Image (tube, rainbow, N blue to C red):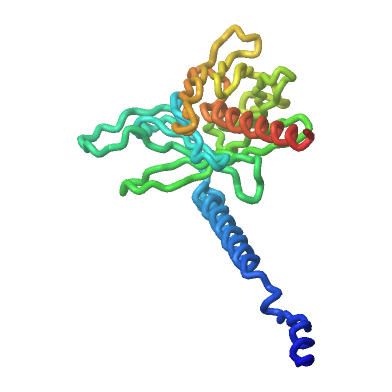
Amino acid sequence: MSDDINAERVPLLETQEDLQNPVDCKEQCCCCLFSIMMILLLIISVITNGGLSYTDLSTDISKIPYEYKLRYKSLWGYNYIIEGHPTEFNGDANSFSPIKSDNSNQPKFIKYAELIVPFWVYGNFNVIEFRRNQTGSVFPVSTVNSRIDNYLTNEIDIVFTASDDDDLKLESCEYRISWSWLLNGYIWRLCENLNESVFNQVAIFTGHPSLGLTFSSVDEKTNYGYSSRAAFFWDLYERDIFIDKAAPFPPIIPALYTAYYNYLEYMRQRNNRRED
């Protein structure tokens, strides 16, 4: 009898299986699945936003029209889309004429180009424009490369991929964007075809991309165009851009200016949150 009583007083030894909490296993599995899903979403986002889909492209002259729409490609990336009414080239690099078609299914807007951020270099925008061959197939070409040259001053260098073509005009020049302490932007140009040996200021951009920009001469006496107020997020912050043909810069410059302005503003806000 005493042995039975003593046996009841001996604590039961817990096995390793008993020590392991089944709830912890479920949490670990959920965390692993969540991590895998996030990695897959990141890879899909990079591919669909152009980080991997546009490689080894041929180069061509930029043919962005003087009037177009600019919007984000998605709400979770930095890439942009340039689009406008269905048009076709009539031989002039910056001249378009409407497509005459009886097809009622023709889209209201077509995509002229994308401003993409290479997945290996965040903060640098390249311009991919789209061409149509004789069979009607659409194919991409590289027209502009740009990068942040100096992170202290946030200067942006812009180079056209076909800039060595002597027949080009404004697209044969190099451009630079800089900002004043008021966050107004200056457009600088270096053009050997125009006997320019150093970068010179050719325009000033005032305003905010979300509220609308104005493109003017350096003395602000001549208006070279403007961008409208950006739409709401469900329209991917779409805005209209108009450039006068007398502007001393190609039509793609306001789009790149908007993209870099928004990107640098986002980086400043993120750094301020870290400091707080």
> Which percent across, then down, holds residue 80?
52, 37
Count the marks: 0
Name the image quarter holding the C terminus.
Answer: top right
Name the image quarter holding the N terminus.
Answer: bottom right
Asked whether the viewer can see residue 75, the reply is: yes
Q: Nearer the viewer, residue 257 or 79?
A: 79
Q: Is residue 55 above or below residue 229?
A: below
Q: Nearer the viewer, residue 6 or 94?
A: 6
Q: Is residue 157 above or below residue 201?
A: below
> Which percent across, then down, holds residue 190?
67, 27
> Which percent across, then down, holds residue 132?
37, 43
Q: Quadrant of residue 92?
A: top left
The single residue placed furthest to the front in the displayed view is: 1
Asked whether the viewer can see residue 150, the reply is: no
User: Residue at 60% across / 39% down in the picture?
Assistant: 125
User: Residue at 57% across / 38% down in the picture?
Assistant: 144
Left or right, 239 with reference to 204: left
Q: Is residue 49 above or below residue 237?
A: below
Left or right, 43 with reference to 265: left
User: Residue at 38% across / 46% down in the picture?
Assistant: 138
The single residue placed furthest to the left in the displayed view is: 102
Q: Quadrant of residue 176?
A: top right
User: Residue at 76% across / 29% down in the picture?
Assistant: 153
> Which percent across, then down, holds residue 257?
60, 28
The single residue placed furthest to the top in the displayed view is: 221
Left or right, 169 with reference to 97: right
